[in-house]
């Protein structure tokens, strides 16, 4: 097959698949559609297609891929058949049809108090590996803070995971706890690749979910501990992590839980609200309202600010924050040699750097 899968236009494929496209977004680099996989929500378009990279991602269910995987999954054919069909470039288009929403029937996660109890017990049974501890020290975290944050290493081996899940199942109902599922041998098991576990906590300090910082060189370093799509599995959702001094009147918003934990530690426990991705901002306004802050400072990575999609997302975050009564919104700006705010704070402790600047957002 001579054609390049990565170049098959995603928007054209979406039309061939009969997706309902948000006409207001047509003509932009990012075009939105109703997600055919999770069924999306009424009047919402969570499937985002990037017409330059020719890829899609659903911000509700997490499905992602390119034209071939979209066509294959919607039509229930193999990737090979989908590619042949698309490269033939036929002019057959489906009439757009509303997807059937599967949201209501999707397994709902257990309430946060139960998730917190299971995750806390799980982390109590795990240790932090030497390599992960070294990584955390290098980022500027003290061992004491790593321990207080309950960072742990998720073991690779199936046996140790099944042993841990089986132990926990004696005390807790694991049904509805993201990350746990029933495996082919009918036993409780833990999903996900091995890596560093990072607890995502709510305003009350309860663990809502766990992120995994994957071991090894990966393009996407962070994944949720999620068992979506597995037998008796549950999706993690995209909880927002709150870390630092809850009484603070200023909240810094950054992307990534570990980054926020480190930055807060290096900046005298300042309050950080951490989204898993710049687009995962559902519930952000409610979190900021619950924290009752007077000032919100956007502290996203410097390199990303040159990316127009990230700039758009940052603008959306800033608009969300600006809807709160009596809250000032600023954007933080620092020495661009340091990409993340955590890198900047770490350097600030070691060398002379310019102070953090706040710009009107
Ligand atoms: Zn979806």
Image: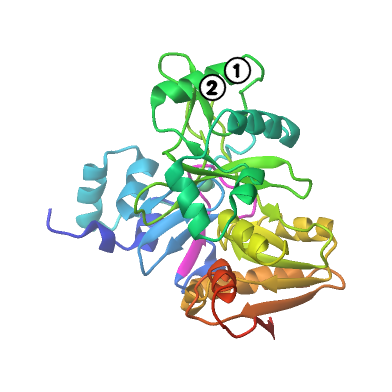
- Position in image of residue 276 (x %, y %): 57, 55
User: Which type of secondary structure does the marked residue at label 1 adopt?
Assistant: helix
Q: 190 above or below 254?
A: above
- The residue lying toward the viewer, choosing from 147 and 257, is 147
Residue 161 counted in the magenta span: no
Q: Secondary structure at mark 2?
A: helix
Is residue 330 visible to us here? yes
Q: Residues within 10 Å of mark 1 (few under 14, many from 20)?
A: some
- Which numbered marker is on residue 153? none
Q: Say whether mark 2 is within 8 Å of ligand 1.
A: no
Circle 1 sits on which residue?
169
**Which one is nearer the viewer's eye here, 298 or 308?**
298
Q: Quadrant of the C terminus?
A: bottom right
Q: CA distance from mark 1 to mark 2?
A: 6 Å
Q: Residue at x 35, y 65 (%)?
A: 53
Is the CB atom of the residue marked by disc 1 within 8 angstroms of ligand 1's nearest atom?
no
Above or below: residue 87 compared with residue 235: below
Q: What's the mark number on residue 165?
A: 2
* Residue 42 included in the magenta stretch of the image: yes
* Magenta highlight range: 30-45
Q: Are marks 1 and 2 in contact (CB under 8 Å)?
A: yes
| Residue at 61% over, 23% down | 174
Q: Is the residue 164 above or below the residue 318 in the image?
A: above
Tell me: 313 left or right of 253: left
Give the left or right position of residue 218, taking residue 57 as reference: left
Decide if residue 45 is in sight here. Answer: no
Q: Is residue 13 above or below residue 36?
A: below
Magenta residues, dominant SS class? loop
């Amino acid at each position: 097959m001579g054609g390049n899968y990565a170049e098959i236009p995603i928007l054209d494929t979406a039309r061939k698949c009969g997706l309902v496209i948000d006409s207001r977004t047509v003509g932009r680099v990012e075009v939105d559609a109703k997600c055919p996989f999770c069924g999306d929500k009424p009047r919402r378009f969570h499937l985002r297609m990037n017409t330059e990279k020719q890829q899609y991602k659903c911000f509700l269910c997490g499905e992602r891929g390119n034209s071939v995987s979209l066509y294959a999954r919607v039509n229930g054919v193999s990737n090979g058949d989908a590619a042949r069909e698309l490269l033939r470039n036929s002019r057959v288009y489906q009439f757009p049809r509303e997807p059937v929403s599967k949201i209501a029937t999707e397994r709902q996660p257990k309430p946060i108090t139960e998730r917190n109890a299971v995750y806390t017990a799980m982390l109590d049974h795990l240790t932090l590996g030497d390599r992960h501890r070294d990584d955390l020290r290098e980022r500027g975290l003290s061992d004491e803070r790593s321990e207080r944050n309950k960072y742990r290493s998720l073991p690779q081996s199936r046996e140790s995971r099944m042993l841990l899940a089986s132990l926990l199942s004696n005390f807790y109902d694991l049904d509805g706890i993201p990350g746990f599922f029933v495996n082919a041998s009918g036993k409780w098991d833990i999903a996900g690749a091995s890596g560093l576990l990072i607890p995502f906590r709510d305003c009350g300090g309860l663990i809502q979910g766990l992120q995994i910082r994957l071991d090894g060189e990966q393009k996407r370093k962070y994944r949720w501990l999620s068992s979506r799509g597995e037998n008796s599995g549950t999706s993690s959702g995209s909880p927002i992590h709150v870390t630092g001094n809850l009484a603070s009147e200023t909240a810094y918003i950054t992307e990534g839980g570990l980054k926020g934990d480190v930055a807060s530690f290096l900046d005298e426990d300042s309050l950080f609200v951490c989204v898993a991705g710049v687009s995962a901002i559902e519930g952000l306004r409610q979190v900021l309202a619950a924290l009752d802050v007077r000032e919100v400072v956007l502290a996203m990575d410097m390199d990303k600010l040159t990316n127009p999609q990230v700039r758009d997302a940052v603008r959306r975050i800033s608009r969300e924050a600006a809807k709160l009564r009596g809250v000032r919104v600023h954007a933080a700006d620092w020495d661009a040699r340091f990409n993340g705010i955590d890198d900047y704070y770490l350097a600030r402790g070691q060398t002379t750097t310019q102070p953090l600047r706040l710009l009107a957002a």
